């Protein structure tokens, strides 16, 4: 299902494109498919801006030349995964801890496509899916306390293969914040961003144009109506 969704998204890539490379297992499939199209000569002159060290490594092993937002601040396309997405194309991302770079790249891309399997599609955002919040290490305790006071259930993310908290590619920590339900994602985003020390949240609102959802019955295409990225 993930692969079929990725295949549909990769059809949007054209020669000469500068593309954002998403993070996670589904986005990695898309990266490999783009690499295969480059190797086969179906595409040429494609450059990628990775949203994480994982995406950079996938791109290097798939033969996609890398660039940066400094060199290419406006991208043609981003293909990325999601932890949860609703029918209005509002998503929760950051399961892999790459939310900050993913959101910067999404807001710098003309077209943002999410690829996911059907388990990610939800009627109610936030149910059984915490909202990851990237926090500066200096502020982690006060932010944690503020989240408790908001009535949320925060949990500092810890990893495997290393003791202690997960440190993001940007040197920050992640607090996974559980709510019973996220009824007003935009309002929640503002409230979280207003806490000093919060650098980014995993709520993606008005950023996603298109989603390909792999299901048992084939790939569903969901289209958004609002575009809120930096490029208008
Ligand atoms: C990483 C992300 C990923 O895109 C998200 O966690 C989905 O990953 P996967 O495709 O492996 O389920 O937001 O920060």
Image (cartoon, rainbow, N blue to C red):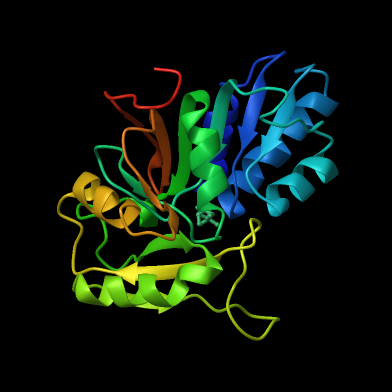
Q: Find residue 58 and report its horizontal and vertical position in percent.
A: 75, 47
Relative horizontal placement of residue 157, taking residue 48 as reference (left or right): left
Q: Nearer the viewer, residue 169 or 122?
A: 169
Q: Find residue 222 and report its horizontal and vertical position in percent.
A: 33, 32
Q: Is residue 56 above or below residue 208?
A: below
Q: Nearer the viewer, residue 208 or 37?
A: 208
Q: Quadrant of the C terminus?
A: top left
Relative horizontal placement of residue 65, taking residue 201 as reference (left or right): right
Residue located 72% across and 13% down the image: 16
Q: Find residue 71 and report its horizontal and vertical position in percent.
A: 73, 23
Q: Is residue 155 above or below residue 197?
A: below
The residue furthest bottom is: 163
Q: Is residue 128 above or below residue 30?
A: below
Residue located 20% across and 70% down the image: 150
Residue located 33% across and 59% down the image: 195
Please state the total of marks drawn on the protein image. 0
Q: Nearer the viewer, residue 122 or 142?
A: 142
Q: Find residue 176 and report its horizontal and vertical position in percent.
A: 40, 69
Residue located 84% across and 45% down the image: 61
- For residue 43, what is the image quadrant? top right
Relative horizontal placement of residue 69, taking residue 140 as reference (left or right): right
Q: Nearer the viewer, residue 199 or 174?
A: 199
Relative horizontal placement of residue 97, taking residue 155 as reference (left or right): right
């Amino acid at each position: 299902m993930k692969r079929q969704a990725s295949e549909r998204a990769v059809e949007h890539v054209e020669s000469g494109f500068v593309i954002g490379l998403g993070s996670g297992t589904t986005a990695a499939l898309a990266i490999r498919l783009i690499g295969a199209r480059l190797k086969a000569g179906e595409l040429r002159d494609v450059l990628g801006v990775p949203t994480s060290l994982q995406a950079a490594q996938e791109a290097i092993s798939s033969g996609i030349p890398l660039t940066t937002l400094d060199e290419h601040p406006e991208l043609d396309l981003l293909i990325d995964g999601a932890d949860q997405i609703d029918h209005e194309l509002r998503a929760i991302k950051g399961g892999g801890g790459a939310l900050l770079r993913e959101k910067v790249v999404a807001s710098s891309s003309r077209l943002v496509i999410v690829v996911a399997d059907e388990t990610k599609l939800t009627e109610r955002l936030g149910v059984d899916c915490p909202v990851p919040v990237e926090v500066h290490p200096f502020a982690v305790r006060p932010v944690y306390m503020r989240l408790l006071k908001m009535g949320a259930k925060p949990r500092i993310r810890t990893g495997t293969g290393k003791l202690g908290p997960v440190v993001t590619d940007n040197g920050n920590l992640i607090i996974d914040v559980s709510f019973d339900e996220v009824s007003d994602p935009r309002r929640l985003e503002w409230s979280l961003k207003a806490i000093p020390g919060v650098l980014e949240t995993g709520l993606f609102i008005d950023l996603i144009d298109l989603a390909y959802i792999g299901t048992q019955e084939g790939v569903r295409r969901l289209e958004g109506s609002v575009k809120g990225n930096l490029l208008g």
